[in-house]
Amino acid sequence: MKTILKKLMSALWLLCLLWGWGLTGCATMPGKEIEAPPATAGFEGLAKRYAVGQIIEPATGDVLSFDQMMARLATVRVVYIGEQHDDMAHHRVQLRIISALVDMGYQLSVGLEMFSRQKQPALDGFGNGKIAEGDFLAQVGWDGRVGWDFDSYKDILRYCRDHHLPILGLNAPDEVVKKVARQGLAGLAPEERAQLASSIAPVTAHQKEFLTKWFGHHQISSVKHTDRFVEAHLAWEETMAETIAQYVTSSAGRDRILVVLSGAGHVVYKFGIPDKVTSRVWVPQFVVIPAAIDYIEARSRDVADFVWLTEPDVTKTRADRPRMGIYLAKNKAGAWTVESVKPGTPAARAGFLPGDVLQSVNDRPIIQVKDIHQAVIGAGGKAVHRVIILRNGQSMELRVSFDHPFDHPGPPPEVPKK
């Protein structure tokens, strides 16, 4: 009996040993890596966790299929799709929704934040094929629009042109809004005031708290007072809302779904453009937010009607598009001038100051904003870049290094609790 028991124990030990070898062998097979668990995100008050690619209805916590969301979107007059302007994943979501609505047989128009109402003739000419793309970009002053990369929007604009979708300019002219930020509405000349919404309601306490945090987040040194920033933001949103309200009640727009593409900060929680549209005319509307999974974590469930989770924001780490950390504007001579410098960035470390006029980067003259990016990319991974500036009329060389991490302007902050 003792011999039999001994043999059984030996066999059991051998099986355990072989099993252990099997596990070890599987764990160390060539080409195999232990992968980190997939990123997930959650919403305030919900126990569920959600993964990249899922479409969530935060109010219920339900995960919807793309077709389920589209069936809902097709029932309203205005669909807002927020974005982080330089996140291509967001623009792919926008184009997929637009093309799906077209495939479903709906008449569509597309309104865009980056175009002012005054540019509508150029938008119409591009949309009907009478203005070539290059001429269109020149007429709308695209190269003067800091922060808007045409590569991010070209597929959407070309799709609208090729499918004969009206393109609507929603906004007020940049120069007028910037003047509001500096001097307030009271500082506008009558002809400038006429280019904004006819009525601009006072900011609500909830939105003011949100915008105050946003102002601090962006550290806009060219705007000295938070109240001026808030006033400019309201002028921006009220003008877009007025344009939308007028369009959806017009003969041109009343039978169409209007898809509005804007920064997420203008549509989250609906107290931006959507609420301002509702104050003018009631139309059914939905808000869709494509959101990087590392941005949406623990947000309130009223952030949007639908949230489409995308990959973590690659624009924070993309090596091919490093960011100096300067905000630019054209001076009266048409040269790119530093408007403000974000603290802790490569530009701040290099010694840039407001008022510096950019001449060249790595010997490439700066005519358009994209010249800066191309000069850096064309340097082939070089860590230090030569920037020639004019400061008080004197030529100077600054050296910019991207070796150190720095803050990215990023999306707006979490909304304060009600």
Image: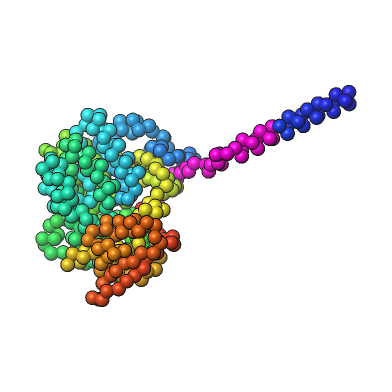
For residue 96, side relative to residue 123 (left or right): right
Viewer-nearest residue: 298 or 159: 159
Viewer-nearest residue: 194 or 292: 292
Count the numbered circles shown.
0
Q: Residue at x 13, y 41 (%)?
A: 129
Q: Residue at x 32, y 47 (%)?
A: 83
Quadrant in the picture for residue 163: top left
Viewer-nearest residue: 65 or 315: 315
Does residue 35 show up magenta in the picture?
yes
Q: Position of residue 175 (x, y in %)?
A: 19, 61
Q: Residue at x 18, y 64 (%)?
A: 334
- Colour setting: rainbow
Residue 235 can be seen in this image: no
Q: Position of residue 10 (x, y in %)?
A: 80, 29
For residue 12, side relative to residue 84 (left or right): right
Does residue 344 show up magenta in the picture?
no
Q: Position of residue 300 (x, y in %)?
A: 41, 47
* Range drawn in magenta: 19-45
Q: Residue at x 37, y 60 (%)?
A: 217
Quadrant in the picture for residue 368: bottom left
For residue 55, side relative to residue 116 (left or right): right
Q: Position of residue 279 (x, y in %)?
A: 22, 47
Viewer-nearest residue: 267 or 167: 167
